[in-house]
Image (tube, helix red, strand yellow):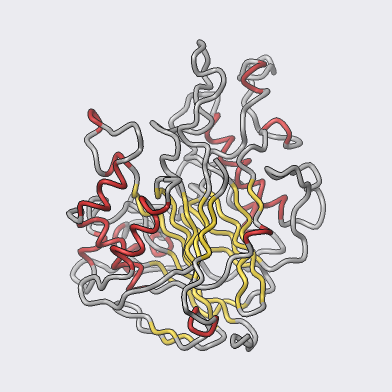
Amino acid sequence: MKPLSLSIALAVSLLGAGCQLTSTDGADKMALSEQTVRVATFNVSMEATNYNNETSIDVSGNALTNALKSGKINQINNIAEIIQRTRPDVILLNEFDYIEDAGQGIELFKKAYLEVPQNGFKPIEYPYVYLAPVNTGVKTPLSAKNSRLTHFGFGKYAGQYGMVLLSKYPISTDKVRTFQYFLWKDMPDNLMPKELNGKSWFAKEERAIMRLSSKSHWDIPVNICGKQINVLASHPTPPVFDGPEDRNGRRNHDEIRMWKDYISESGNSYLYDDKGNHGGISNQSFVILGDLNASAVDGDAHPDAINQLLQHVRVNNYLAPTSKGGALNKPENKNGPTHTAHWGMRADYVLPSADLNVANSGVFWPHAGSEGAALVADRSASSDHRLVWVDIKLPKLDCTQ
């Protein structure tokens, strides 16, 4: 399946598409200047197990389509309301099942939910979409054999836990790079698991085909009124659900390391995208987005996994986004204000490059008793993750051309 890019050119000028005064409704009422762009990431938990009982899951992956069409799933309305309240200009949705026919997936979500007022909040339009296949649920050539590598990424069907980028600004689709097929073994000094005797934990035939990305890694150039910012999107595997070999923890580390190498001035010539082009980006502005499943202070990830990015010279070292809801969710944890997941860790990241100025940031997590708190009461209300946003202040741009 080829990546599907939906650059829907409605009768909207670039001025109408984003370079304008934008207000944020609800809990966050900060007005954005014409030089400010809000970028967000949100693990929306819009995958089949959220809409089907585990014992009767729709293994064809149609559960999300059916849920969207039913109009009876309050969780979907709440996800849309959260997006309408925070009003990002560019947003990555993690755990939105990949549906190749966009009319049965992301376009349905846009038209029936985002572009319809939710609980009185103003509709929001995203004329530009990038969506492509992911590795989750994709069977390997060894799936019929007695192999530990049955799928390239954990999933009950191809496309589970997918991702999609929504943008008010045009996407340079001809410049998009994807790394779905990059092999883990081709990363120098990788952390692929080994036995105590030093031999590979994976069998020879498994190691030869094992992909690095559990979903995919995308480099998506977004054109903001003539200013290009590359969105680097991914969703590394959780560093758990394995054994003493720590294959998922090691994979998580190296999935994050890929972005570290990709944005570095050197040491990335080994990287090849799905079209066979090598190298990374060393001078381009970027924003790293996604549920990276790693924290430097909480959880089970390798301690240095996320620090590969947080301490990178090319990553803006702004203060982590915070919320009062996160602080009150885990009052005993001093890191609570920066948490983005209900179980208590910072898992979701918006990391602009060092050349971009951060004007403001936050985590949408209304505390109990405040307006909007019902939207994040539990996973069934919306998601077990929270939307994270960052406002990037850009030089004055000409959006009329």
Image check: 121 left or right of 396?
left
Q: Nearer the viewer, residue 212 or 178?
A: 178
Residue 76, quarter of the rendered image: bottom left
Residue found 32% across the figure and 74% down from its top: 123
The image shows residue 108 at horizontal and vertical percentages of 34, 57
The image shows residue 187 at horizontal and vertical percentages of 72, 37
268 vs 314: above or below = above
Q: How many marks?
A: 0
Residue 219, quarter of the rendered image: bottom right
Image check: 119 left or right of 93?
left
Residue found 31% across the figure and 46% down from its top: 64
114 vs 34: above or below = above
The image shows residue 362 at horizontal and vertical percentages of 43, 71
The quadrant in which the C terminus is found is bottom right
Residue 247, quarter of the rendered image: top right
188 vs 391: above or below = above
The quadrant in which the N terminus is found is top right
304 vs 351: above or below = above
Image check: 11 left or right of 264?
left
Most distant residue in the top direction = 146
Q: Nearer the viewer, residue 322 or 192?
A: 192
The image shows residue 388 at horizontal and vertical percentages of 43, 64
Residue found 29% across the figure and 39% down from its top: 49
